[in-house]
Image (tube, grey):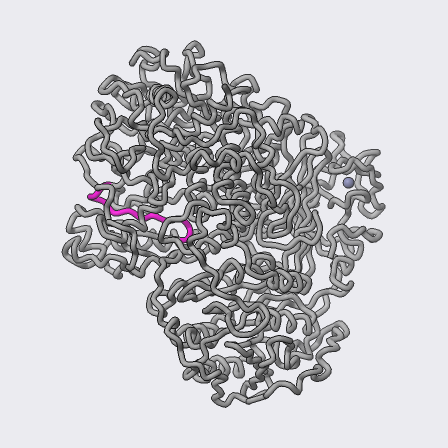
Amino acid sequence: MNVNQSAPPVPPFGQSQPIYPGYHQSSYGGQPGSAVPPTPYGAYNGPVPGYQQTHPQGVSRAPPSSGAPPVSTAQAPCGQAAYGQFGQGDIQNGPSSTVQMQRLPGSQQFGSPLAPVVSQPAVLQPYGPPPTSAQVTAQLAGMQLSGAVAPAPPPSGLGYGPPTSLASASGSFPNSGPYGSYPQGQASPLSQAQGHPGVQPPLRSAPPLASSFTPPASGGPRMPSMTGPLPPGQGFGGPPVSQPNHVSSPPVQALPPGTQMTGPPVPPPPMHSPQQPGYQLQQNGSFGPAGGPQPSYGGPYPGAPNFGSQPGPPQPLPPKRLDPDAIPSPIQVIEDDRNNRGSEPFVTGVRGQVPPLVTTNFLVKDQGNASPRYIRCTSYNIPCTSDMAKQAQVPLAAVIKPLARLPPEEASPYVVDHGESGPLRCNRCKAYMCPFMQFVEGGRRFQCCFCSCVNDVPPQYFQHLDHTGKRVDAYDRPELSLGSYEFLATVDYCKNNKFPSPPAFIFMIDVSYNAIRTGLVRLLCEELKSLLDYLPREGGAEESAIRVGFVTYNKVLHFYNVKSSLAQPQMMVVSDVADMFVPLLDGFLVNVNESRAVITSLLDQIPEMFADTRETETVFAPVIQAGMEALKAAECAGKLFLFHTSLPVAEAPGRLKNRDDRKLINTDKEKTLFQPQTGAYQTLAKDCVAQGCCVDLFLFPNQYVDVATLSVVPQLTGGSVYKYACFQVENDQERFLSDLRRDIQKVVGFDAVMRVRTSTGIRAVDFFGAFYMSNTTDVELAGLDGDKTVTVEFKHDDRLNEESGAVLQCALLYTSCAGQRRLRIHNLALNCCTQLADLYRNCETDTLINYMAKFAYRGVLNSPVKTVRDTLITQCAQILACYRKNCASPSSAGQLILPECMKLLPVYLNCVLKSDVLQPGAEVTTDDRAYVRQLVTSMDVAETNVFFYPRLLPLTKSPIESTSEPPAVRASEERLSNGDIYLLENGLNLFLWVGASVQQGVVQSLFNVSSFTQITSGLGVLPVLDNPLSKKVRGLIASLRAQRMRYMKLIVVKQEDKLEMLFKHFLVEDKSLSGGASYVDFLCHMHKEIRQLLS
Ligand SMILES: [Zn+2]
C-alpha cells in the first residue's frame, strides 16, 4: 500500500459521503441487511487442504501432553528483579546502605520538601547570595586546573569510560541501520560528530572532582538567585538574535562576594545590568534555584553523601563538592514552565513556536499547525544550511504520535469527505491539501508548499480569494485552516482495491504447565468474559465491529470453533507446527454478541481442560504464524494477543536456545544480547506486516525467555510487549489485568502506512519506533495505537529559506476499528535561521533526549555499549561547545555556559547514559535490558522524560487538604528527609519510600501499624483506611497510575532496608552502583569535554 497514489479526478465538492460497505459478514453469522455484495471470502467455502490432518476432539478433557513431567525450572525462583517486579524481596545489592542517611537538623534547607527548591521565590531571599553560579565557576575552574596539573587516580566506574576508548569513541556505530530495526545502511548521524579535532578520549583523568575543587568561599554572603519566571516573550523566539539566550556562570574574577550581584531584591523577572561582566540579559535560569535561606551554608554539610568522591582510598580532607543547588535543576525548569505557560492555551497559529514542556498541563488550540500532542520537534527553528546544522550538531528530529489521544476538552480531528475523488493532492509530490498551500491566479491554481509545483484547482473545489489572497472558505474547511484533520480514503487507498473488512482480535493463550500452575490461564479466561464487551468501537457505534477468535497452545496448537449456532465450542488440534495452517475458517472469527454463549462456555472450559497438564514445552513462531494465516484467510487486518510463559524450546520453527550470558557485558559481543538469535522472526514479521497483523505480547517468564528475540514481531508490527516476571496471581493480577484492559480497549489503526513529506531543503532520513520499512520512505505499521510514536530525523539536502520556513506533513493511511479506510494528516511549519543563536533559542531538550535515547538504544544492536555512550557524550559536548563558541559572549574559560533551552541537557543525558540498557547494574537481567530497549523505542516525549528522570514527590509536607500534586523534588538521596514519605515514579515503577523517623501518627494513618519497624518492606498495597492522609496518598497513587501508559506496581521501601538499593537506582542525580556518574560529576566532565573542544 502506498500513500503516494495519484488522486483520481475530483468530483463536485460536497458530494455525499460514499456509503461504506456494511462489511457483509454472513460467513460469520454476521450482520443482516448489508447493502453491498458479500465480500468473496473464497476461503470460507470449504475446508482447506490439510483440514483432514487435524483431530477434532470436541471439548473433551484432552490434555495434549507430551508426558514430560514438570521440570524443576518451572519452580525456579526468579533470581532477578524484573521491571516493576521488585517485590520479590530477594535483592542482592550488597549492603543496604553504603551511603548513610545521616541528617543534620538543618538538612531541610536542602532536601526537605518543606523548602522545595521550586517554591522559593528567589527574590524574597533576605540573605546574600545563595549558592551561585559563581561558585560553580570557581569550582569548575578549580577542577579544571587541578585536573590538568595533577591527574587524579581514575575514578572507579565513572560513566565516561577508560582511555582505551579513543578509537571506538571516535568511530561511528558501524551498522546503525537507518530503519528502525535491523537492516544495515547509512552511517549514524552521530558518526559525523566524530571527526572533530578537539575530541579527546573520555577522561581517564577525570579527577575525583570534589577533592580537587577550589573550595568555595564558605559562609560568605550570597547572591540573590537569578531564578525567576521568564520575562514575557523571552526564550520562545521573541527576542532579537543579538541577545544570547543562555545560562552562564559569571567569571570568577567578577565575583567579589556581594558586589555585583547584590542589590535590592526585585520581583521577577530578574533585572540584570548589561554592564555586569559575564552576565547575559537572559540569564533567567541561572545555575539552579535558591534553596531557601541558607545563611551559613558554605560547603558540604557533615554527613552529606560525598558527591564525586570515590570509595576506596581514604582522602585526607573531606572533599569540597560542587553545590548541587547551584546547577540547573529539572524541578525548577519544570515548575517555571508550568507557572509561565500552564494557564494560557497553546495556540498553534504562529510558525515556529516552541510549545510548553510535556510536564506542563496546557490546552491546545489548532490554528493551522499540528498540536504538540501529535508532533514535537527538537528545534522549531532549523538552520538554513547543512553547514550550520553540522556545526551545531543539534539533531533535527520530530517525535510524531499520529493517533495521540487528546484530553476531553480538545476535539478530535475533523473527518473531511471529498467523495469519490478522494483528498486533493499536489500532482507532483502528492502532498495533501493543507493550510500552507498558496492559492494563486484568483483561486484557479495552487502552489504546493512542499515542492513548489503549481497545480490546477479542480472546478468543484474552486473558491474566490479575499484581498489577502486567502480563500474565502478557508475557515470552513479543516484542510485549509487546521494543522490536523482526516480524509476519508477512497477505494484507491485500499489493499487490492477493495474496502477492508473490520479487523479481528485473536487471543492466543499458552496453556503449558507454567501458565496453568501460576493461575494465569484461569485469571485470563475469567477476565476475557467481561472484557470482550469493551472492544474498541468507533464514535457512537453500539457494538464493536471487531471479531474475535481463540487459540490455546503448548507444543501443539488448539483452535476453537465458537460459531453461534453451536451448543458447545469445538476444538481442533494442529500438531504439525512445522507447516502451520488454520484448520477451520467458518466459526473461528465471530461476533462477540452473537457467539457469547459459546465463547463463555469455552472460556469456562479452557482452565479445566488443561488443569492437569504436564506439558512444559512451548512453541512460539507457529503461534504467530497461525494467527496471521487466520487473518489472511478472513481477508482482514487485526491483532494477536499472545500470552506466553517460557523460552520456546519445543521442536518447531523459531525454536530458541538459552543463550543468556552476562559475561558478555562490557565486551564487543554485548550487542548480541540485544539482537535476535535467529532471523526467522524477522521473516515472520514481514509476513505479518503484509497482512496487517499486529502482535501484542504478554510475557510471564520465570527465567530467561529471550525477550530480544520474542519481541521482534511485536516490534516490527507496531505491537506492544508486557512483561510480568515471576507472575503470581495474588501479587500481579491487578497490574496484568489493568494493562490488559487498557491494551484491549485501545483505539488502534490497522494496516497503516505513514509518510512524512517535507518542503524543499530537508528530508526525512531516519526513523525510530515499532514498525517495518520495506523502502526508505514508507513507515509500515500493521497496527498503530494512540500511545505509539515514530521519531523521524531530518537532514538537509538543500538550502532553506528564512522567509518561507520549512513545512512537515505527516500522512497516515490506516483502517479504523470499524474498518473504515482513512488518512490522518498532520502539518507543522517551522522557522529557519541564519544565526545559530536562533537555533539554540528554540530547542526542546525533552525531545532531544527522546531522540538521543532512541538513537543510542538502536546503536547497541550494532556497537559496543561503551562506544554508544561515548558517542552521546561527544555529541552533547559538541552541541554545547558550538553554542559557547558562536552564541555566548566572550567569557572566562572557567565558566560553563549552557543555552537556556538546553540547560538540562547534561543532567538528562547523564540519565540516559546510566540507564539499564547502556550501563546495567548487577540486578538487571538481559531480558530486562532487551525489554526496556524495546519499550523506549516507541515512547513519546513525556514518557522518556519521566522514565529517565523520575518524579520524586514528598507526601507529608504539603497541607493535608491540598488536592494538587505535591511539588516534586530532585531525584537525589540528599533531597530525602528521614522524617518524610515520598512517592517515586518513572512511568513503569512506583515506590513509596518511608523515612526512618516518620511520625508515628503518619505511620498509623497510612499503614495501620504502630511503628516504622512494623511496616512490611516490599508491601505492594496500602491498606484502605478512613483518614485524610490515607485517602490522599491512595488518591495520588491512583492519579499517577492514570497518567501513565502502563500500570505501575507499588513497592513500599523502608529507609535502610535492603530493598532501598532498588529505590536508590532511581535517584538519578546520584552516582549509581553500576558506576554511572552523579549529575555533578557529569557536569564537570561535560565542561571539560567542552573546553577541550574549544581549545
Ligand atoms: Zn508538491
Viewer-proximal residue among 993 and 775: 775
Task: Say above or below: 870 vs 702.
Answer: above
In this view, the residue in front, 249 or 348, is 249
> At 34% across and 27% down in the image, what residue appears?
152
Q: Is residue 238 magenta?
A: no
Q: Nearer the viewer, residue 627 or 145?
A: 145
Q: In screen coordinates, is 550 left or right of 272? A: right
Report x, y in % for residue 637.
Answer: 65, 66
Query: Ligand 1 quadrant?
Result: top right
Count the marks. Answer: 0
- Whether residue 439 is visible here, answered yes or no, is no
Residue 1067 visible at all: yes
Counting from the top left corner in percent of width and height, residue 532 is at 51, 72
Where is 984 relative to 259, above or below? below
Q: Name the quadrant of the N terminus.
A: bottom right
Q: For the point 60% across and 30% down, which residue is it?
A: 381
Measuring 37% from the left and 12% from the top, which residue is drawn there? 254
Rendering quarter of residue 927 = bottom left
Q: Where is 215 relative to 576, above or below?
A: above
What segment is highlighted magenta in the picture?
Answer: 977-988
